[in-house]
Amino acid sequence: MPNPFNQQIIEEFRTNGGRVGGPFEGARLLLLTTTGARTGTPHTTPVAYYPDGADRVLVIASAGGSPQHPDWYRNLLAHPRVTVENGVFTYEAEALVLEGAERDDVFARAVEADPGWAEYQAKTERVIPVVALREIPVAGPPSFAASSPGEAVKLVHRAFRRELALIRQEFAASGTALGAQLRINCLTLCQGLHLHHTGEDTALFPFAAGRDPGLAPALDRLRDEHERIAALLEELRRAVSAEDADPRTVLTEVDRLTGELEAHLAHEEEILVPVLEAASASAS
């Protein structure tokens, strides 16, 4: 029987493109759908996650420090193929339970980012599992949680804005040390933005130009903005990757990127969304 609390979060998550209120407001949250170990039926659970590169995320089977593993964890042990919804995309993933030193290193990263994980571990005798969810590549366009191409662009942009806001909050709470997970959050953001802009340069911008040749000057300006953002991403990568990285220096680069990116996203939506909506309307 569905958990009413979880069901409310699931509905809010899907309605608002991954944004929820209450105890999970401002958290990195995904919807994880597993196949029941005994029943074979799908079960969807909201789960907190950590970024870990462009193609995988990390989830922790804490169950609040319960003596038993959560149901979703037992399900994925039996059926490692799962479905992930992140508010923008829905994709299939392979679940891999981390073992040994890799598990310990990732859990230590999580504890450094949020000491609550250590409190959960102290409450139970079981070793709390850490699971990597690696996206399974598929041919064709991604599955967007959007009703139209224009809305898909806005959803992606909203996700980048939200991630930047979270990273800035994490810097505010980090003090004088730059934690390992915060470094990875920054580097994953850089990877994601690079891939997003590469896709726009090679596919979306040529499509828009084909729909309206008069957009050429505006698209050239957007490409120039991509180049400026790429330079800022490189500066952020350098600052984060330095062995003696200073959080104040890194935050300065995050702030520079945020200012440039906010202006770019707003400009891009102004140019591209009407073209994509018109194309969608003519195709329907």
Image: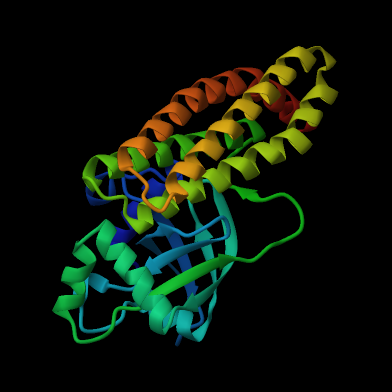
Residue 72, horizontal then vertical, whole percent: 39, 75
- In this view of the protein, can residue 108 be seen by the observer? yes
Q: Judge left or right: residue 169 versus residue 87.
A: left
Name which quarter of the figure residue 208 lies in.
top right
The N terminus lies in which quarter of the figure?
A: bottom left
Q: Is residue 117 above or below residue 39?
A: above
Q: Which residue lies at the image location 46% right of the left edge and 50% below the top edge?
A: 241
* Residue that appears at 68% across and 22% down: 224
**173 sits to left or right of 95:** left
Q: Give the quarter of the figure containing the C terminus.
A: top right
- Which residue is at the front of the view, 193 or 205? 193
Task: Please provide percent x and percent y for residue 45.
Answer: 39, 64
Q: Is residue 42 visible?
A: no
Q: Residue at x 20, y 70 (%)?
A: 118
- Which residue is at the front of the view, 179 or 3? 179
As drawn, 272 above or below 100? above
Pick the front one: 96 or 275: 96
